[in-house]
Image (cartoon, helix red, strand yellow):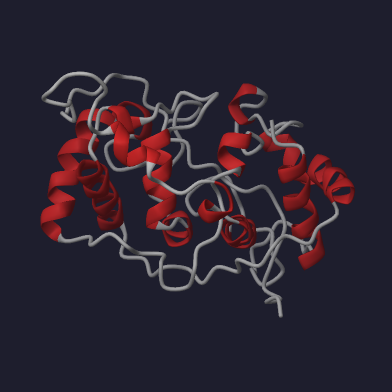
Amino acid sequence: MRRTTLGLGCAVLLMFGCAEDADTGGEDPGGGEPAAASWVAELPTGEAATGVPSGEMRSIEATPAAAQAGQAVYGANCVPCHGAEGEGRLGIGPKLNSETFLAAASDGYLLRTIGRGRVGTTMPGWGTTLDRGEVESVIAYMRSWQEVEPAELDEEPCEGDAEAGAERFREICAACHGLSGGGYQETSNGTGIGRSAFLADVSNGYLRYIVEHGKSNTPMRPFGRPEATAVANLTDQDVENVIAHLRASAW
């Protein structure tokens, strides 16, 4: 049975937005395609990528040594768009150093996002220049910003009405995220959440959690009834409807 602690709103897109080239290794000694690219091709896609089984939120060991190595990789590649400590840069790269974001984002989600990038945004796929170990070290470094326990995500299938969700999205979410969910391409104060590259990779549980709790230290406020500072007291069904709309209208 579905948990009742859901709220509605506009989910937040993780969009590593660094456009600079990285030269941190990963080349095949024998020539041809970079060796790093092979590990990205092995990452899950489709339904296998949009659900997070219980206990799999943290699969990367975030040791102090790994975090230290990741800080160097992050500093060489991610700082121009996301800031030295994940504070983000408005219109370029979103904030990563957020308690609710770090709680809801699984290691697998971060790994896929960094490795593949986000088509249609300034976030390139780093899997062509960084090997998997380097990317895992970046994730370990991100975890060192805040010691946050993994969130308990509701990963049940979405049971929403896309048409009703479209109306609610226009009323509540479009002002920040744009009518088509294009984010900064349409507005000046919200990330993109309508692209298929994002929605094909993000889980329903992540969307529900961020909508309910918001993205801390950003303009993305909570929209769920359990939150005292919620922008709107919206129902579980409202949440499902908006998620259904996003998935049905992904572009």
- Horizontal arrangement in the rendering, residue 85 relative to residue 195 (left or right): left
Tell me the quadrant of the picture where the C terminus can be found.
top right
**Residue 41, position as x, y percentages in the image:** 39, 38
Viewer-closest of 230 and 79: 79
Q: In which quarter of the image is residue 209?
A: bottom right
Left or right of 191: which side holds 135? left
Residue found at x 67% / y 24%: 186
Q: In which quarter of the image is the N terminus?
A: bottom right
> Can residue 96 be spotted in the picture?
no
Q: Viewer-proximal residue, 109 or 149?
A: 109
User: Residue 123 appears at what percent x and percent y?
Assistant: 43, 28
Visible in this render: residue 172?
Answer: yes
For the image, the number of numbered tags is 0
Above or below, comparing residue 101 to residue 188 in the picture: below
Residue 166 occupies quadrant: top right
Residue name at image x 23 percent, y 19 percent: 32
Residue at image point 47% right, 36% down:
15
Furthest toward the bottom, the residue is 1
Q: Where is residue 88 in the image (x, y as percent from the top left)?
A: 40, 36
What residue sits 65% from the left and 29% below the top?
182
The x and y percentages for residue 7 are 70, 63
Q: In this view, does 164 lie to the left or right of 101?
A: right
Left or right of residue 131, residue 92 in this image: right
